[in-house]
């Protein structure tokens, strides 16, 4: 209960920090200098949510189907409340979803075996304050943790269903699926591996096909924008380019980013699996995800939020976790004034300051990945046997 109270206090502060400038119209770069930018206002006004548009309307949401529907439902609730729906109303209804998702993640982490100290890694995380209301990614985090819990309880088909649903919200919960399939194959359980992988793929397709058939242009928006996006100032690619490295176009950069991620993920799995039993291979989802965020051509702020619950589950010690959180706070502190400069608002901060912060955060993330790959965690984080429910051993899938 005390940990939940801490989470609610952190969330209250985080919500206020983002909403306090929504009514001001973001004059003079207020959203940057006031550290109050979020995606709530742009989507409310520019995607027709203020006029009651659906997730794939004339100006479709640039998100995969599950997340697009989740955002739209918050808008529907805003319009259903008494009075005229405003961007602040939408921020409040979206905030209600976020609070429920954060608390659900807390419950799942507790059921995954974390004690109060480790639960505070999530409940009191600076990333929770900074990014819980920045975007909408608390839902896929919950789905990833749900898939993890089901896998660890031996319910691998159900785990595949939840992981597939998570991947239809944001891709990263899907990174668990190949790890579970490989672990089940290593344990000579090919049928369970097939059921897990098939369930994940089936749910992913079952969600995407209706969205494509009903609104093909809207469904394609997410993939189109992703393919056209170039390197962002918060990515390692931008830093390398500023240091004299190559500056590939969006298409070439997408392929290069994917290749680097794939190579890093394979290396993580090969090296990490040697030091673990197959039933512990799920822990490698953390360093795989680190490879993804470092190789990406954009490091969206909420990426760090994805990592926090996994670090609480998997890391043996707090030092690399603290390094990631503090370096990420530093990036946040210098990135917004730099973005203000790029948008023509004042002098702000020059890029070398941001580049140094990005490099520090990348080093901290590499530390996390190396720590996990080389040193499987001891007890309690992430190494408990498959739990029992009310004293009765959980039935495993075939």
Image (tube, rainbow, N blue to C red):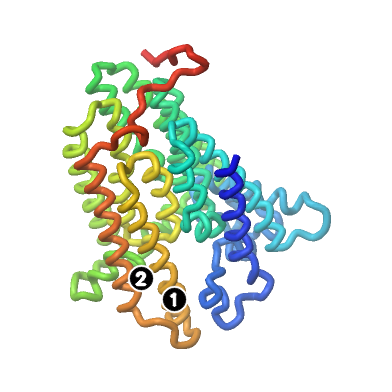
Q: CA distance from mark 2 to mark 1?
A: 9 Å
Q: Is residue 137 visible?
A: yes
Q: Residue furthest toward the right?
A: 82
Residue 152: quadrant of the picture:
top left
Q: Residue at x 23, y 69 (%)?
A: 240
Mark 1 lies on residue: 339
Left or right of residue 141: residue 372: left
**What residue did someone put label 2 on?**
233
Classify 10 Å Cα crowding around label 2: few (below 14), some (14-19), many (20 and above): many
Task: Residue 397: name its quadrant.
Answer: top left
- Label drawn at residue 309: none
Question: Along the line of sight, which residue is nearer the eye, 30 or 192?
Answer: 30
Q: Residue at x 58, y 60 (%)?
A: 14
Q: Position of residue 199 (x, y in %)?
A: 42, 26
Q: Is residue 98 in view?
A: no
Residue 99 higher or lower than 346, as above or below: above
Q: Are marks 2 and 1 in contact (CB under 8 Å)?
A: yes
């Amino acid at each position: 209960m005390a940990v939940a109270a801490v989470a609610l206090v952190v969330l209250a502060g985080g919500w206020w920090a983002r909403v306090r400038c929504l009514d001001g119209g973001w004059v003079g770069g207020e959203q940057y200098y006031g550290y109050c930018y979020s995606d709530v206002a742009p989507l409310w006004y520019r995607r027709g949510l203020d006029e009651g548009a659906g997730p794939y309307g004339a100006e479709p949401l640039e998100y995969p189907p599950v997340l697009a529907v989740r955002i739209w439902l918050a808008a529907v609730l805003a319009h259903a409340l008494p009075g005229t729906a405003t961007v602040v109303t939408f921020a409040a209804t979206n905030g209600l979803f976020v609070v429920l998702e954060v608390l659900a993640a807390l419950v799942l982490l507790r059921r995954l075996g974390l004690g109060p100290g480790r639960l505070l890694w999530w409940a009191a995380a600076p990333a929770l304050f900074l990014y819980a209301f920045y975007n909408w990614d608390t839902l896929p985090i919950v789905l990833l943790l749900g898939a993890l819990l089901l896998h660890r309880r031996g319910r691998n088909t159900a785990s595949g269903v939840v992981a597939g649903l998570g991947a239809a919200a944001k891709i990263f919960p899907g990174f668990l699926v190949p790890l579970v399939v490989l672990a089940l194959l290593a344990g000579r359980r090919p049928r369970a591996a097939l059921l897990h992988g098939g369930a994940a793929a089936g749910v992913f397709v079952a969600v995407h096909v209706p969205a494509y058939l009903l609104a093909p242009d809207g469904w394609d928006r997410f993939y189109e924008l992703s393919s056209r996006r170039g390197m962002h100032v918060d990515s390692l690619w931008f830093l390398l380019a500023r240091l004299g490295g190559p500056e590939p176009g969006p298409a070439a950069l997408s392929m290069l980013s994917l290749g680097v991620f794939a190579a890093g993920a394979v290396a993580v799995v090969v090296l990490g699996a040697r030091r673990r039993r197959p039933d512990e291979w799920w822990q490698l989802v953390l360093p795989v995800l680190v490879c993804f965020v470092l190789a990406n051509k954009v490091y969206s702020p909420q990426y760090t939020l994805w990592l926090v619950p996994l670090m609480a589950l998997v890391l043996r010690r707090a030092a690399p976790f603290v390094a990631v959180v503090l370096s990420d706070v530093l990036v946040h502190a210098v990135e917004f004034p730099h973005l203000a400069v790029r948008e023509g608002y004042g002098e702000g901060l020059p890029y070398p300051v941001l580049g140094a912060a990005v490099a520090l955060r990348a080093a901290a993330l590499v530390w996390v990945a190396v720590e996990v790959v080389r040193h499987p965690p001891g007890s309690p984080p992430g190494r408990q046997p498959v739990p029992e429910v009310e004293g009765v051993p959980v039935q495993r899938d075939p």
